[in-house]
Image (spheres, rainbow, N blue to C red):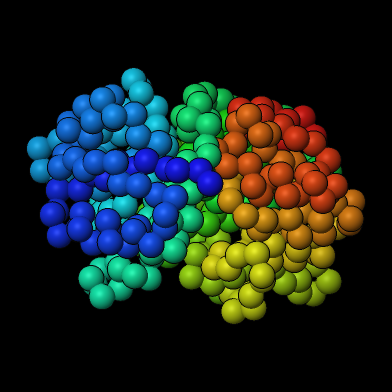
Amino acid sequence: MQHIKVLLVDDSGFMRLLIKDMLAIEPSIEILDVALDGKEAFEKTKLLNPDVILLDLVMQNYDGLYALQKIMKEVPKPIIVLSGASEMHPEKVFEAMNAGAFDFVAKPGKISRFRDIQHLLIHKIKAAGKVNTERLVYTQNINNYPHTFEEHTPYKIIVIGASTGGTAAIETILKNIPCNLPIPILIVQHIPSDFGYSFADRLSRESPFEVKIPKHEEPLYDQGVYLAPSSSNLKLKEENHGEMIRFLYSEETYPNFNFPSINMPMISAAEIFQEKSMGVLLTGMGTDGKDGLREIYHRGGFTIAQSKESSVVFGMPKAAIEEGVVREVVHLNDIPAYIINLF
């Protein structure tokens, strides 16, 4: 059994006791030490060499971002942001993810709800304990200059699915896709419901595209870039023999993952666009997206999986590759150019 040594960073004594108590049920996890601010977290990381760091973002003096940036630059470690910052500073969470944080878990608003995240937190700590730290920080180039596209494109939609490590990976792709891409992109990122609109806003600022969360029954437009809502599953519906495609919110569930499911929009896109559909499955835990890629693959569309060496967590891409439904495995930094070469 792997033994995972954790450095717990939080300036609240009560919160440190609560988190320690929550993790005590898992014998493979040991709280190695605690730190009260970002500076102490950095110093203790160098001294104690923990396997995983649980990091609050909002602290007095030196905050969590200070620690994260220093640690990832000098002594990279898997860092799970455990913070209530989502309620007031969602942008800080995305800064943390882009600086190399492994994942994020939101502290519940009420102390009575903390046990709700106990098993999720343990699951993420175990996954973080296995990660290769070299995969946590992306080198992001930017190249979104216009490209000459043929009038009749071989593909009519791109559906991108991601989970752990996906926020930074998606930014990398959008920053390097030509700004005049003539077909829609639908992005499905496993993300807490409070973060959806903030993530869409960030992508709109950091890329040449206006990224929006579509409303129920909203039409799908060419050149639109959409982020699936994280409080419902999303599917595409064809009307008038393909003259209109609409987004539909659905409470239908899948065994792999829900709200948002990657499988649902990929499957519905494949049913509508057939061989003109493209699916891209990025870094993430679990197997969501495998069934969606299978549907695209068997209907003649093109399927891409992110490579192991560029994935923070290789779970989702690996599941699809082992299923035999991936046409090409591509390094994250090469995915934008690879997509454009297909046109």
Q: Is residue 166 visible?
A: no
Q: Quadrant of residue 340?
A: top right
The reply, left or right, for residue 259 in relation to residue 205 is right
Q: Quadrant of residue 92?
A: top left
Residue 296 lies, in percent from the top left, at 81, 55
Residue 317 vs residue 173, the one in the foreground: 317
Residue 185 lies, in percent from the top left, at 64, 50
Residue name at image x 23 percent, y 62 percent:
18
Q: Is residue 13 visible?
A: yes
The reply, left or right, for residue 78 in relation to residue 114 is right
Residue 312 lies, in percent from the top left, at 55, 38
18 lies above or below 10: below
277 lies above or below 236: above
Residue 213 vs residue 307, the one in the foreground: 307
Residue 194 vs residue 323, the one in the foreground: 323
Q: How many marks?
A: 0
Residue name at image x 34 percent, y 43 percent:
6
**Quadrant location, the C terminus:** top right
332 lies above or below 190: above
Residue name at image x 51 percent, y 43 percent:
2
Q: Residue furthest top?
A: 74
Residue 101 vs residue 13, the one in the foreground: 13
Residue 48 lies, in percent from the top left, at 29, 29
Q: Residue furthest bottom?
A: 251
Residue name at image x 10 percent, y 37 percent:
61
The reply, left or right, for residue 222 in relation to residue 91 is right
